[in-house]
Image (spheres, rainbow, N blue to C red):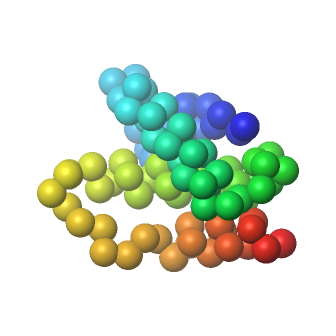
Amino acid sequence: MLKLPLDELKEYLRIDGSEEDVTLALFVSAAEEYLAEAGVPVEKQGTARYKLAVLLYCAIHYEHRDPSEKIEKFNFSLESLILQMKTG
């Protein structure tokens, strides 16, 4: 499992401080579970595409944390990365 370091995720999201570390760690775990359940093979976990998919998943959920907000369409970039990792 990748276990993306929080400092890398915080740099990607442009977050300073540690106030949201617990939430960000939850997002990373959820992203890894999501990718596994989406059928991404275990051997892809160390790849740059896998890392980018985790970052994208976390960014989407960080930016859309309002429970009343409905995400109409999941991010095309993330869907594309998942498909690439599953097939190639």
Decide if residue 17 is on the left or right side of residue 67. right
Report the front residue among 64 and 70: 70
Q: Position of residue 67 (x, y in %)?
A: 20, 52
Is residue 68 depicted above or below 5 in this figure?
below
* Residue 14, percent from left and from top: 44, 44
Q: Give the residue at x 79% y 74%.
A: 87
Above or below for 84 versus 26: below
Between 16 and 40, the residue placed more toward the observer is 40
The picture places residue 79, in percent across and down from the top left corner, at: 57, 72
* Quadrant holding the N terminus: top right
**Which residue is painted at 68% across and 61% down in the image?**
39
Q: Tell me the quarter of the image containing the C terminus.
A: bottom right
Q: Where 78 falls versus 68 (above or below)?
A: below
The picture quadrant where one finds residue 85 is: bottom right
In the figure, is residue 72 to the left or right of 27? left
Left or right side of 63 for 34: right
Residue at the spot 71% in from the left edge and 59% down from the top edge: 40
Residue drawn 74% across the image and 68% down it? 86
Q: Residue furthest left?
A: 68
Q: Is residue 11 visible?
A: no
Residue 29 percent location from the top left of the image: 54, 37
Q: How many marks?
A: 0
Q: Is residue 88 visible?
A: yes
